[in-house]
Image: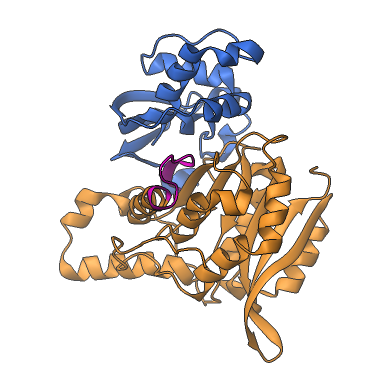
Amino acid sequence: MLPTPDTSHVSFDTIYEPSEDSYLFLDTLSSASESKWLSERFDNTKHTPPLVVEVGTGSGVVLGFAAAQSEKIFGRRDILTLGTDVNRNACLATRETAINAIKAEQQPSPRTIHISSLTADLCAPLRPGSVDVLLFNPPYVPTEDLPRLPSAVDNDPAAAAAMSRSAKFDSDSFFLSLTYAGGADGMETTDRLLDAIPRVLSPTGVAYVLLCKQNNPEDVKERIRGWDGWNAESVGSSGMQAGWEKLVIVRIWRDDGL
Amino acid sequence: MKVITANFVTCAVKECKTSPESYPLHFHDAELEQQEQEFQPEFIRNIVPRIDWDALRTTSNELGFPSLPESKPEGEALDDEQILKDLHRLLLETQVSEGKLVCGNCGHEYMIKEGIANFLLPSHLV
């Protein structure tokens, strides 16, 4: 088994603690079938170093793993990683997780470069067509309300330092709710991400999105197959419940991408 | 954040996406840090073809680096160790720790603190 990146530096007051869904991501990316598929798609004789982006990185365990294990997963070490999260603390945590994981796994000569962690809403600042591999473990739990998007002010470290204890508790709860609360069918945030995929992915780009049973993964895949030239397939799953997988990871890619 | 990031980001405001002025974003008041990384010539050689060269030249000038060649190095130019070393230093060793990224179209300023750029927008721009 490949080592899970160390997240012992992360405070889980506002950040999602790596759980079953995170580990399903690690297992799926490093599975024999997915790593073969990815290594062929991003073969270094045909492809420039891929830009691997995780949206909503939290602790950075998934992106750190993809970075540190790039040789196993992508068949090459010269990849670039970039993470986004609406929580600035998660961005700081991810940078540390990724850099430490690369150092721990790629001695004596590190190759994979974590280029930045950005505080952002999903892919909002990413240049169209720039992303080769997109990873998303969304807030997928169906909830009555969807939490509002944080603003730059919510992420101001000076404001956080000046908060009363109860204000700090409210702020922490708000950020934690963003890690899981998905609104109607648990799909409100995932739907916005899916809408952005054709814009941000490169022609050979591929996205991996985790869904839970209540998100109706079969319907989601059907919808993606209805986009012109796109395909979607389940490539990882865990936890059977009444004959259905509780969690699945769907691979989304352009059919004509190669 | 590493300087190469500027090659992959643009203004987060929807209306700016179609404007050529929104890319690349412009560094203002940037504080730079150099972090030594092992020189990996093939990494740089591989990465050059996917760089938007004009955008990188703009970024490099704004950060006060010596000018990059006018056209993207290709073929034999990629065996020139000095060019590769300059690019290694600019792209991979240079970090922007403080400052802002500014959109040339709408003027919005994205603050960079401790190397983390904040692209969240105020509610009236979402």
Is residue A76 toward the left or the right of residue A160 in the image? right
Return the x and y of residue B114 as percentages of the image width and height: 28, 40
Q: Which residue reaches farthest front? A: A108
Percent coordinates x, y for residue A32 in the rendering: 67, 63
Q: Which quadrant of the structure image shows residue A135?
A: bottom right
Q: Residue at x 45, y 67 (%)?
A: A179
Of residues A148 and A124, the one drawn nearer to the viewer in this rendering: A124
Q: Is residue B103 visible?
A: yes
Which residue appears at 64% of the width and 33% of the height? A48
In this picture the colour scheme is: by chain
Q: Is residue A136 left or right of residue B25?
A: right
Residue A193 place in picture, x, y as percent: 61, 55
Quarter of image, res A49: top right
In-front residue for pair A184/A243: A243
Q: Is A248 in front, or is B13?
A: A248
Tell me which residue sits at (44%, 60%) in the image. Answer: A61
Magenta highlight range: A102-120
Q: How many marks?
A: 0
* Residue A114 on the magenta segment: yes
Residue at the bottom extreme of this rendering: A242
In the rendered structure, does residue A108 fall within the stretch colored magenta?
Answer: yes
Q: Position of residue B95 (x, y in %)?
A: 35, 31
Q: Which quadrant does the C terminus of chain A fall into?
A: top right
Q: Quadrant of residue B97?
A: top left
- Chain in blue (letter): B
Residue at point 66% right, 50% down?
A197
A37 above or below B64?
below
Q: Which chain is orange?
A: A
Say whether residue B119 is visible: no
